[in-house]
Amino acid sequence: MTFRGDIAQAVTRRSDGASAVACVDLRILATSDLHAHLMPYDYFRDCPDDKVGLLRVAERIIAARAACENTLLLDNGDTLQGAPLGDAAVSEIMPRGRTHPMIAAMNTLGYDAATLGNHDFDFGLEALAAAMAGACFPVVLANIRRTDGVPLAPPRALLRRKVVARCGTSHTLRIGVTGVAPPQIARWSRKRLGDRIQVADMPRIAARQARALRREGADLVIVLAHSGLGAAVAETGMENAAHLLAALPDVDAVIAGHSHRVFPDADHPEGLLAGTPVVQPGFHGSHLGCIDLTLSRTRPEVADGPGPHWSVSGARARTLPLSPTPGTGLRRVFRHHPALIPTARAEHRAVRRYAAQPLGESAVPLETYFSLIAPCAATQLVADAQADAARALIAQRPDLTHLPLISAVAPYKCGGRGGPSNYTDIPAGTLRLRNAADLYIYPNQLCVLRLTGADVKDWLERVASAFHRIRPDAPDAAPQPLIDHAFAGYNFDHLVGLRYRFDLSQPARTDAEGAQFFATPGRVRDLCHADGTALQADDTVLVATNSYRSEGGGHFPICAKAETIATAPGNLRDAVIDRIAAATAPLSPQVAHGFSFVPLGGTPVLFETGPGAAHHAARARALGLTPLGLQESGFFGYRMVL
C-alpha cells in the first residue's frame, strides 16, 4: 500500500536498506488526556466550544485514516474524569449498566487499545472497573495492580492486524502494546484507595513488558505512557519518564501524556527521542497524535512463529491540531459514524440537565482572571466552604480546637497550560451545579494537616515559583513578564487566614514545575496571621487542604511529610455545594487580604491573563492595572507596577 499525497516522502529514515517490495507503512494515531470531553461543548459555561472534544478530534481521525491504509488508534489515559460528563457518568442520572459515554464513543470510533491515567482512578476502583468492562478494545496497564488479587488491567496486549504492503501484498502484523502510569498515583489517591493498589517504576516495568512482547513474537512494541517527557537521566519513582521509555531497546514508539503538553516541539521537529518516535497530543482533544512508521521485512512470515518478521526502518511523529471548521467537521463525523448520533445527543442533553441544577445565588461575579496577583471572591468562596467542613472535623478533636486554622485553596482554572480560555468566569446571579464544578474541578477529599510555621513558609516558597524573577528597573522601562506559564495554576495555593508578601527580586526556591529545588533564601516575606501577628517558625497551625496536596501532589514534599489529623469521606466539591445551598441571602464572599508583593521601586511588569478579563475593567482598575491589549501568546496583557 502507499501513503496518499506526500506522506510517504515525509517519513524520516532511521536506517537504510528498506525495500519497496517489502515495506509496510503504518500510521499510529493517538489521543491523550481527553478528561471526559466528548462533545465540543463547555458545560461549565453552558455553551459550544469548538476547541475540545473527542468528537471534534474524530474528524482528524477520519481524515488520517483516509490518507493511510494501515492505521492504529490508541488512547493514553485520563479519559474518564474532568468535564461534567465524567461526574454525570458515575451519578444517578446515568442508567446502571450503561457503557460509559467516553468508552461507548471510543468503541464506535474503533480504538485498538488504551491505557489508564492517574485521574481515571479518581472515582474509585469499582467505577473504574465498570467503565473498563464496556470497552471493546484492550485496556493495558503494567506498573499498577490491585493488592487484593482482583485483576486491574492486563499488563500488555499482542494485537494481530492485517496490513497491506506498498507492493500490494497482504501481511499479518503483530503489534505489542503495554501501558504505564505515574507511580505517584498510590500517594495521590491514598485517601480514596487506601492500600488497594501497588505501583512500580515505569521504565523498569515497561522494559520487562517490552521484552515479553518480543518473546511472544511482536514485530513492534508501542508504550502507552501516561507520563510527560521528563529528563533523560533515570531517577527512582519518576512521574514523567517518556524520554527514558523511548530509550528502551525493545520499544519502537511511545505515546506520552499527563502533563498536557504538545510534542513534537520546535526543538524536536521530527519527534524523535533517543532515536524513537514520541508523540504527545495535548489535552481535551486539542490535537491528534500521529506517528508514521515504515516497516521493513526482516524474514519470511511463519504463522505464529517466534520472533519479529518486521523492523522499523523509518519514523516520524507529529501532532494534528483540530480543523478550523467545527460544524462541518462534526457533521462529517456523524456521517461516518451514525451510531454516535443517538448516544451523543442523549448524553449531551442529560449532562446539561444535570449541570443546570440550581443551588443558590451570588451577589458578585466569581472569576479567576486576576487570581495569580491578588485574592479573589472565587477562591474565597471555596476557602470558606473548605474551612467550614474542616471545623466540623476538628470539633471532634478537642485537643486541637485551640490551633489556628488556615484554608489552602488554588484557582484551578487560571490560564497556564490550559491556555487563554482556561479561567472561571461566573456572573452574579443564580449559581448552578456546573458553577460549583467550575470552582472545584477535581473529586478530591478534604484533609486537615498539622504543620509548623517553617513548614508553611516552605509551602509558600513552592507557590512563589509561579513568577519569573524580576529585575528592579526604572518605571519607564519595558515591562518584564511576570507569570511563568510553565507553572500549573492548580498549584498556586492561596493560604487564606494568613498574610504574606512575595519578593520577586529574589530567585525562586524551585523551578516552575517543582522538579528542581535550589538553595536560595526564598521569596516569602512578612508571614503573619490575618490579625498581623507574626507566624513564627516553631508555631503550630492546622491547614485545611485537599487529598492530592496532602500527599505531596504538585511537588509539595512538605505536605507529604505533615501529619494528617483528619480526612473527610466525601468530595470537597460537595462542601462548596453545601456552602452555596445553605446561604439565606445571595453570597458575597469577604475576600481576605492574603498575599501581595514587595514593592520594587515602581518596576513595571507584564501580567498576562485571559481575554475575558476585559469584561472586568473595574476589577482591573482597582488592582492598578493598565490594559496593553492582546498579546502574541493569546493572553490579554496588563501593565502592573511593583
Image: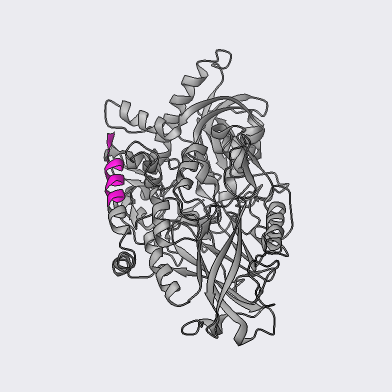
Number of callouts in the render? 0
Q: Residue at x 36, y 29 (%)?
A: 579
* Secondary structure predominantly adopted by residues drawn in magenta: helix
The image shows residue 21 at horizontal and vertical percentages of 60, 86
Q: Inspect this view and state whether residue 52 appears.
A: no
Is 143 included in the stretch rendered in magenta? no
Front position in the image: 456 or 204: 204
The image shows residue 481 at horizontal and vertical percentages of 53, 59
Q: Is residue 218 left or right of residue 635?
A: right
| Relative height, residue 549 to residue 49 (above, below) | above
Q: Is residue 345 left or right of residue 472?
A: left
The stretch in magenta equals 346-360
Q: Residue at x 27, y 25 (%)?
A: 584
Front position in the image: 222 or 604: 222
**Extreme-top residue of the structure:** 398
Residue 276 appears in which quarter of the rendering? bottom right
Front position in the image: 336 or 305: 305
